[in-house]
Image: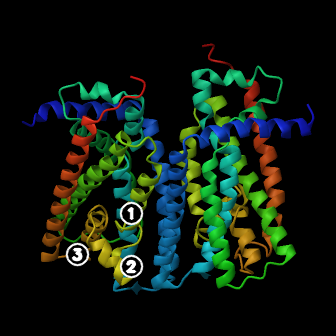
Amino acid sequence: MSVLNYFDLYFKLISAGVRAQLQYRFAFVMRIVGLITSYTGTALTMWIMLYQFQELGSWTLYEMLFLFAVSVLSWGFCIILFFHFRGLDTYILNGTFDRFLVRPINPFFHFMAMKFDVASFGQFIFSIGIFTLVSFKLQLDWTMGKSLFLLLSVVGGILIQGGLLVMISALAFWTTKSEQFYWVGMFPARNLTNYPLVIYPKAVQWFTAFVIPFGFVNYFPAAVLLEKETPFFPENIGYYSPLVGIVFFAIAYSIWMLGLKRYKSTGS
Amino acid sequence: MFRFRLYWTFTKKAFLRSAVYRFDVWSRLGSNLIFLLMWGSIWTALYAGREEAGGVSFESMLTYIVVSQFLTGVNGAGTPLWEIQEKVRTGDISLELMRPFDVPLRYLFADFGSVAFYILTALLPLYTVMFIFMDLTLPSGWETWALFIVSAFIGFLIRYCIEMSFGLLSFFLVETGGIVDVFYFAMSLLSGSVIPLWFFPGWLETMAIYLPFQGIYYIPNAIFIGKISGAEILLSLGVQLFWVAASYLLLRFVWNRASQKVVVQGG
């Protein structure tokens, strides 16, 4: 099948999913309200923190909110595309994963297109709200170049976080566990990046730059856009964010495919 | 009539069950430590080399965060809320309603078991090492230790009653996401679990003081580092006792309404 066919198929599959979710209008609204509340909660926590102390590792409140919003925006897309990957273990254990293998399309693609979580509108509303507020407060000048760079780093962020979700789900092929790895590993690690990495011990900063490249999701790109320094790292390292995303995702995809080869059905 | 031996069985069973699934239990430590790293780094950066801020030394502040993260581990080791909500959604809860015990109490006693296992095998060894190797302050007298443990225990009960009351809303609503998120937000911020109340803006501090959440983390933490001392401790424990009574009544009220209204989906 050609790439174009895949696009067409993706939209067909997800539009069915979206329509299904919109049937439960109350649940849909409640989830968005819930998401916006918890993000606003984190923003409020930052505000209280800096109410007494003014700055955190030379980052001011609005700069931190910007940093946070970059991460929330890419995470919103990530939820749409990849969030359900963490639940691969359930499919394997129940034997329902087999249905992704018996169709004439790429199983990775099929699994990816299975779900489309519309609640991510919560992330979009929140991050766009914060971008507007911060641009106004810090009088950011959104030139074409800067806007394009933000867009590309968001894509980078999607690929990095999505790649990690894909890697976590691939673990299910070997260990029949994945959801748990997300909650004890990736969920808290993502929370670390809500704050500027400069405050963490150097080893942690290196790890989040070069092993699990979370730093390229928001810290490095935000530093470029806000013209802030990133101690211990080369200047403008943030420009590599899209590239890092592509490489990291390619690695994740290969690992997933490797795991798939190893997969044996439960036979149930 | 309260049949202690019956409920104690649930405690023992939960303890043994945790022992069977010990790797799942211990893996939670990873998450706990990452959050400790995060809040420890944040407060180190906020103090930025200052010896003290707001009348509290850096050492005490760091101790506050470590104790808080310890208690977060304790409070998160019981039956997760979604598991109970799932039982309501699938109708499995009806099996428990038929049995001759009180469901909220049964889960509380089961939580005692799993929390005890987690404390003894994971939290206590790890945090003991941390207190040995880091510059943290310990309470000076055994009375403070005792009062801290009492206060933390009451805090645990307050958290259980409120969290369970929110969880039981799934008897009335199919989707509780939004409401539960508001609760978790209130619990993390207004309880002082990550920012102590004395650093709040005045109006918010006043608000937090009149809410039950401070009894979960702020009061035990502040007793531990000696920010609350002397007669003030007794007053704070009184406030906690008031809130544990109030939240218990809330739980009973919600539970009574909920069990009257069991709508098992699909029959």
Crowding around mark 3 (Cα neighbors within 10 Å: few <14, some 14 to 19, many 20+) is some
* Sooner in the amino-acid sequence: mark 2 or mark 3: 2
Q: How far apart are the alpha carbons under marks 3 and 1?
A: 22 Å
Q: Nearer the viewer, residue A259 or A206?
A: A259
Q: Amino acid at mark 2?
A: Phe
List the residue tagged with mark 3: B228
Is disc 2 placed on a helix, strand or loop? loop
List the residue tagged with mark 1: B186
Is disc 1 placed on a helix, strand or loop? helix
Q: How far apart are the alpha carbons under marks 2 and 1?
A: 14 Å
* Left or right placement of residue B39 versus residue B117 in this view: right
Q: Amino acid at mark 3?
A: Ile
Q: Nearer the viewer, residue A62 or B257?
A: B257
Q: Residue at x 37, y 38 (%)?
A: B84
Q: Are marks 2 and 1 on the same chain?
A: yes
Q: Position of residue A207 (x, y in %)?
A: 66, 59
| Marker disc for residue B200 | 2
Q: Chain of mark 3?
A: B
Is B188 situated above or below A46?
above
Q: Residue at x 28, y 71 (%)?
A: B222
Of badges 2 and 3, nearer the viewer stands 2
| Quadrant where the image shows the C terminus of chain A | top right
Of badges 3 and 1, nearer the viewer stands 1
